[in-house]
Each structure stands twice: as C-alpha cells, then as structure tokens.
Amino acid sequence: MNYQELAQKLVKKALKKGSTQAEVYLELGEEFNVQVRKSKVEFLEQSHRKGLGLRVFVKDKLGFSYTSDFRSTALEGFIDKTVYLAKQASSDEFNGLPEEDLPLSGELQVYDPEVKSLKMDEKIDLAKRCEEAAFSFDPRVKNSEGASFSHYEKKKILANSLGKSVSLNSTYFALNCVPVAEEKGEKRGSVFWDAKRFYKDLLPPEEIGKTAAQRGIRLMGARKITSQRLPVIIESVAATKFLDSISYAINGESVYKKSSFLTEKKGQRIASELVNIWDDGTMIRGLGSIPFDGEGVSTQRKKIIDHGILTSFLYNTYTARKAKTNSTGNALRGYDSLPLIFSLNFYLENGDKTPEELIKSTSKGFYVTDLMGMGINTVTGDFSQMAEGIWIENGELTYPVHEVTLAGTLLGLLQGIEGVANDLYFRSSVACPTIKISQLVLSGK
C-alpha cells in the first residue's frame, strides 16, 4: 500500500464531506526489546504499530479521531465521524492548520538501514555482554536487575489540505545496564545507558556495563552529612534532570496560561552569563531531530537563553496564535494525539572547563552524581531533590555521601552557575554538561 497516497486521498475525502481544512498524520513502526538477567533472557518483545490520526476543521471548529483500521469501508465511516465531531465542537478563533511554509531541513541522518540486518542472537548478545562487563568489573557486583537492548524503526507521513505532503523514516537504538553491588549488608543499585539514532554510534556494551558498575561501587559505604550551604557540582547525568524541567517551563502553552515560573521573563536575565541553552531540531543524528514537526512546520535551531538572557519560548500553531507569534516547529504528536509542545534537542552549551577542573576549583563542596524524586515545580520554580554523590575536600573527591536533599529555586540555580564543563553528551534529546553552582542548601542529618 502507498501510504503517502492514502493520506492525500483521505484529506480530499474529508474536504468533500464538509471540512474547511483537513490533515492526516500516519505512523508505521516496528519495536523490539530484549531484557536479560544473569545471562538469561527474561523478556523479549517485538511489536508493530500502525495508525492514522485525522484532524479536521469546519471553519474554526476542531474534530479529531484516530484509527488503526485501514480498510476502505472503515475509513469512510471514520471520516464521517470526525467531520461530525468538528461540527458539534465549540468555535475557537485560533484553530486551523499552520500557514507557515518554510523550507524543510536537509538530510538529518536519523535513519539507520542496519536496523533491518541485526540478527536476534546479536541483539540478545549485546545485552548479555553489557551485564557480564558489570559483573566482571568488581567482585562486589553480585546481583543485577538486568540489562536490555531495544530499537525501533518508524515512518511518519503528514498530508494536509494546504498542499503539504511530507514523510520521515527514523530509527532509535538503546542499551542499558542495572547492576547491584553488595558488601557487608549494604546493597547499591546503579544504572547507565546509551541511546543513538545509529546502531554503530552506541557505546560498546562492555563500556556501558563497566560504567554502570563503577557508578554504584563508588557510592558504597556512603555517609550522611550535616545541613549546610556550600558549592555544589552536578554531574552531567544528574544536571540533565534540571535542564529537562527548564524545557517544560519554556512551553508556550504554560507561559500563556501563566503556569510557568518564566512567565513575563522574556528578554530578562534569568541565568549566569555562562548559560547558553539551545533547542535544535536540525542537529545531525540528534535523538530529537526531525525536519518537520507534528503539523508539518519546519523545525529550527533556536537559542532559548543567550548568555543568561531568556530569548524565546516554544510554540505549536495553536498556542502561537494565542500569543500573537509564530510556531517554532515544536508540535510533537503520535497518530493518536493532537499536537502538543515539546523540545527537540534541548541542551546547555559546553563550557571551557573539564569536570576535573571544576572539582579542583572547589575547596569544599558536594559532587552530585544522582538525583531522585519528582520534587521540581515548574510553576513556582521551587525544587527539593534527594541527592547522592561524593564529598569534595581541597579540590579532591573524597568519600561518598547519601540521604541529602538539595533545595532552592530553578532561577537561583541558573543564576548561581559559575562553571560549565565541556562534557556534553547526548544519550537522550535533553542533555547538559557538568555544572558548578556557587552555593546551594544541603539538608542532611
């Protein structure tokens, strides 16, 4: 079946049945996941995904439905139902398809044809090698919650009544390991992973397993500390959690509803001059890279914070119209959802220091290796996060620390950044290098 032609055909049918505007978003895909534990396969899944969403407008009324039934007779009734839903809906002057017609980005290299040639035994072996490397790293690694390898292959097609007809093939590969170290009654679980668009870009399974074990071992025998206020260095993996919260705070819908701590802050200094944050949908092989968003709008490379100044929010077409601006190409969706606003490749730009240099510059402080919990409020900007890591004394990492709570505000954290490392690495679509905060409140024993 030619799915591009099918999408265009359904758009025309929706117009004939009474729609003023129509859009079809179609998805096809295959997913695979294997998990092993102690060298035995615990879980293996291979699934297929197919469906299409139909968004129609009758003047300024919206109707939306989705289906996975592609039979001609079923699709006829599906279109009738969707147009009927639109006619019953309330009017909204901001409804409608995007009017922007910018050129799409060039080849972003987000599809790896090797996805079709990977053999089942090879996939299982990857997970086994990852876990074996963790067990081999240290005799204290005596247990495991498993290691897994997964991938997907997707095809997205969008067609609308304004003449837009585009498609995209993409792939994704991920490998992770969760070893458990034990010593003198103490158990310490840890996790490390990698994810890439291209299979051969993944870190070797032995490196992932070894790093996962190392991250757990270094926290064995952790101590508690007293409450105090002092410099904090947040390792890249943990710092990414804070940056992820910033990506939600710049959501144009939240800003319009005044439910973001960054409302009314555009054009103002909200962070240290060292802070440069980008959202880039055009990054080559980026995990969040796409030439067009869920409405067919061209994606862009946008500077969100420029040397500490907030310069931009993220919008889809509907929210942009409410805010009297243009879509930023950040409408993301599945076939079974309406376009919502999300970041693409969202990252804090590298600094000019190594993580080791940040540590050496700290006479006394706390090096955070992990954050736990959901204690970040993007409405108020307040945060309270359980943390663990390593104590810094005279510029050296000394002993592990746990049961610490970091508390403050996201604005305070951004403004307090006095060092940015050069270890930016993408293992998700949000990434942050190691950062040093001048002072944070640590609540301990």
Image (cartoon, rainbow, N blue to C red):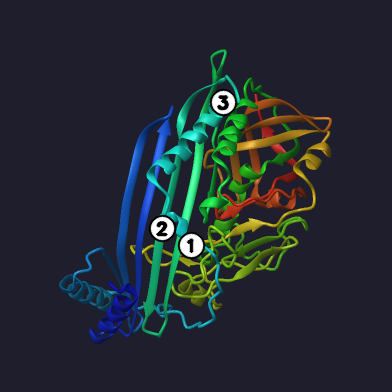
The spot of residue 173 in percent (x, y) is 48, 51
In the rendered image, is residue 189 in sight?
no
Asked if labels 1 and 2 touch by Cβ distance under 8 angstroms, the answer is yes
User: Circle 3 — which element?
Assistant: helix
The reply, left or right, for residue 355 in relation to residue 58 is right
What amino acid is at disc 3?
Ser
**Quarter occupied by residue 162:** bottom left
What amino acid is at disc 1?
Tyr
Mark 2, residues whose alpha carbon is within 10 Å: few (<14), some, or many (≥20)? Answer: many
The reply, left or right, for residue 263 in relation to residue 64 is right
* Cα separation between marks 2 and 1: 8 Å
In percent of the image, x 73 and y 62: which residue is there?
269
User: How many labels sit on residues?
Assistant: 3
Mark 3, residues whose alpha carbon is within 10 Å: few (<14), some, or many (≥20)? Answer: some
Q: Earlier in the sequence, mark 2 or mark 1?
A: 1
Q: What residue would you read off at disc 1?
A: 111
**Quarter occupied by residue 333:** bottom left
Res. 417 mark: none
Q: What residue would you read off at disc 2?
A: 153
Q: What residue would you read off at disc 3?
A: 136
User: Circle 2 — which element?
Assistant: strand
* Cα separation between marks 3 and 1: 34 Å
The spot of residue 283 in percent (x, y) is 60, 64
Q: Is residue 329 above or below residue 172?
A: below
In percent of the image, x 60 and y 58: which residue is there?
346
User: Circle 1 — which element?
Assistant: loop
The spot of residue 5 in percent (x, y) is 31, 78
In the rendered image, is residue 329 in sight?
yes
Looking at the rendered image, the quarter that the N terminus falls into is bottom left
| Along the line of sight, the residue nearer the viewer: 214 or 430 | 214
